[in-house]
Image (spheres, rainbow, N blue to C red):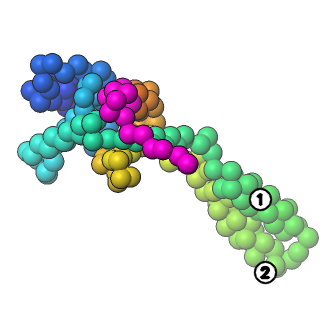
Amino acid sequence: MTLQDELTKIQPFIEDDETSIDAYSSDVETGILTDRRLIRFKTLGRNEDKTQVTSTYFNQVCETRVEHKTTPDFDQDSLIYGVIALFIALVSIALTGQFEGDASAVLILVGIGVGVMGIILLLEAYNTPAGSVTVHLKTADGEVAVSVILPEDHLEFAQTLSKTVSNAHTPSSRVTQTVG
């Protein structure tokens, strides 16, 4: 289902006087941000025969926390161990000429085994987890009202959501705390 199809399904849940600001789509759900709330839409079930729509109104939210995990280029530890293993494998195979009989065969087997492990470590070094953006909307007492996990390239949506939550509180209704 395309984003446009899912947004069409969400449209009946938006009031006429609400303004749509932004939208997102992930593997799990689709969401639309309005000036008053965040509407999340999921299809559930084996045959995707169930629909779940959740609204979080911003007058209930007092804090927004955005966590951005970037995708690393490579895993430095796996890369270092892979290079060390390949070096040990090369040295082991190079030393086979210095020994005779069973010792030479053992060095070849050790070199091949460590070399295969080194190649696997090098390949795994570049198999890094995908980044993500997590948004936590919290109530006045600090409880998480909703958490949304987005793909890494949706950071701009998270920033817009944070600004929209802030704008939903007029200066007279903003939660304030006296210090001192």
Residue 131 in view:
no
Picture quadrant where residue 38 is located: top left
Amino acid beneath label 2 = Asp
Q: Residue at x 19, y 21 (%)?
A: 18
The foreground one among 67 and 105 is: 67
- Please give the range of residues in magenta: 166-180
The foreground one among 75 and 145 is: 145
Residue 172 higher or lower than 67, as above or below: above
| Residue that numbered label 2 is attached to | 102
| Residue that numbered label 1 is attached to | 84
Q: Which residue is drawn at 32% across and 33% down?
A: 173
Q: State the CA–CA distance, disc 1 to disc 2.
A: 25 Å
Q: What element carries label 1?
A: helix
Report whether 21 appears left or right of 73. left
Q: Where is residue 30 in the image (x, y as percent from the top left)?
A: 25, 35
Picture quadrant where residue 74 is located: top right
Q: Where is residue 169 in the image (x, y as percent from the top left)?
A: 33, 30
Q: Is residue 167 magenta?
A: yes
| Residue at the far right in the pictured view | 98
Q: Quadrant of the N terminus?
A: top left
Q: Please name the predominant secondary structure of the magenta segment in the image.
A: loop
Picture quadrant where residue 112 is located: bottom right
Residue 58 higher or lower than 180, as above or below: above
Amino acid beneath label 1 = Ile
